Amino acid sequence: MICGYPQSNIEAVIRCDAHRGSPARNVEKSSSGAMQAVQYTQIKGTSADDTLVGTTLQDRILGRDGADAITGGDGGDSIRGGAGNDRITGDGGDDEIFGNGGDDRIYAGAGNDKVSGGAGNDLVVGEAGDDVITLNSGNDSSFGGGGNDIIRGNSGNDSLWGDGGDDQLLGGTGNDSLRGGSGNDRLVGNSGDDVLFGEAGSDELVGGAGADRLDGGADADRIIAGSGDDWLTGGDGDDRVEGGSGSDIVVADAGNDAYVGGSGFDTIDFSGATSGLVADISKSTVTGFGNDTITGFESFVGSAFADQITGSSRAETIAGGAGDDFIRGLKGADLLTGGEGSDTFVYLKKDLASGTFDTITDFSAGDRLDLQDALKSLKFSDVSEVVNLSSTEQGTMVSVMVADQFVDVALLEGVNSFDATNLLADGMLLA
């Protein structure tokens, strides 16, 4: 490598042509001929595939064209890969690295580095230090490494991993995958259908636009869905999970969690619970899988065990899941599914309202209608006097006498073979 000096300037610059001669040396020279420390070197590659190695000084390295291998050295370097598929290592110091064109592999090294991947499908590894990494066009991958890093995606489908430290990962446009790693991280998917994993630490996950999948992981996290039809779970820990404007599915997990459905038709799913639940949607409480609060959900899914589920005055979709469940829709035109097991659908007198009725989708042998409270003030010699079953195109409508007239209570969907006396005799009607 041949190095030339400028004619003057105390801050001497070494200009090196990478294709000529031996590697650069630390040189001292002043305009008067006295020796003085050089503050930085400037190293330029060629259009070929160059190997460029910096010094312990603050190097300025330009790879130019070709698939270059560039190492910055210990100083705070400025490195530009240029066109081509380059491999760049910042090494020590607080470096500024630009991948430019091509599919580059960039390892920032120790220090608090600033890295821009440039065009192409790049791999950027921050390694040690608090790094700021900005990706560009292409489907890029980035690992923050140790330290509190900021990683920004861009256009393309990017994969971002914070690794150690308290990191900020910003997905940008495209369908991105973000992993927080250890530490208390903030992950933002922005637009696109993104997948966000908080992993360890108390993380904040924001889905943004698109149909996103957000998983808080371990510890106490905050999950915010944004717009789109999202899938959300807090993971272990005492989490707060907020749905947003789409029709979201929120999967409950262990811990004392707060779940908010938001706008849209939202589902809270407790099918992963390890024991039976006591859920009162009207009071926003669920126990049995921690002490949880739920608000703003239109659909509720119970556990595989024996649950007690109470709805609200709104119209809801309630699925008991496996197990022998007790389901009370309360007021509102509810869609009820008992699921596997012998389920009991409970109707209290105060729940009956003219003009609305529930639809039970899977009423079958082993299930029961509990009308005891609804009928307790009525005098009758035969149950058919106060309970009427009529066939419809959809199934059997169950009506109960209220104030000297029959009020529709429940439609047994797909059922056409029962009458009140038979139901009572078979133990399927509690009156």
Image (cartoon, helix red, strand yellow):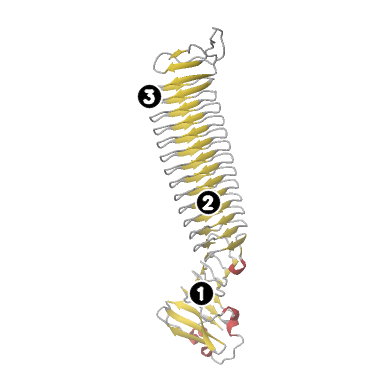
Instruction: Please give the residue where the numbered disc 2 appears in the rendered image.
Output: 215
Q: Nearer the viewer, mark 1 or mark 2?
A: 1
Labels 3 & 2 near each other (Cβ < 8 A)? no
Q: CA distance from mark 3 to mark 1?
A: 72 Å
Q: CA distance from mark 1 to mark 2?
A: 33 Å
Up-down: is 426 above or below 324? Answer: below
| Residue 235 in sight from this viewpoint | no
Image x and y of residue 347, in percent: 56, 78
Instruction: Please give the residue where the numbered disc 3 appears in the rendered image.
Output: 49
Going 53% across and 62% down the picture, which residue do you hit? 268
Labels 3 & 1 near each other (Cβ < 8 A)? no
Dot 1 amino acid type: Ala
The crowd level at tag 1 (other Cα within 10 Å; few <14, some 14-19, many 20+) is many
Up-down: is 178 above or below 97? Answer: below
Which of the 4 image quarters holds residue 260? bottom right
Identify the residue at the far bottom of this view.
381
Dot 2 amino acid type: Asp
**Quadrant of image for the N terminus:** top left
User: At numbered mark 3, what does the secondary structure look like: helix, strand or loop?
Assistant: loop
| Residue 19 in sight from this viewpoint | yes
User: At numbered mark 1, what does the secondary structure look like: helix, strand or loop?
Assistant: loop
Q: Earlier in the sequence, mark 3 or mark 2?
A: 3
Image x and y of residue 379, in percent: 59, 91
Question: What label sits on residue 333 in the rendered view?
Answer: 1
Q: Earlier in the sequence, mark 1 or mark 2?
A: 2
Going 58% across and 36% down the picture, which residue do you hit? 147
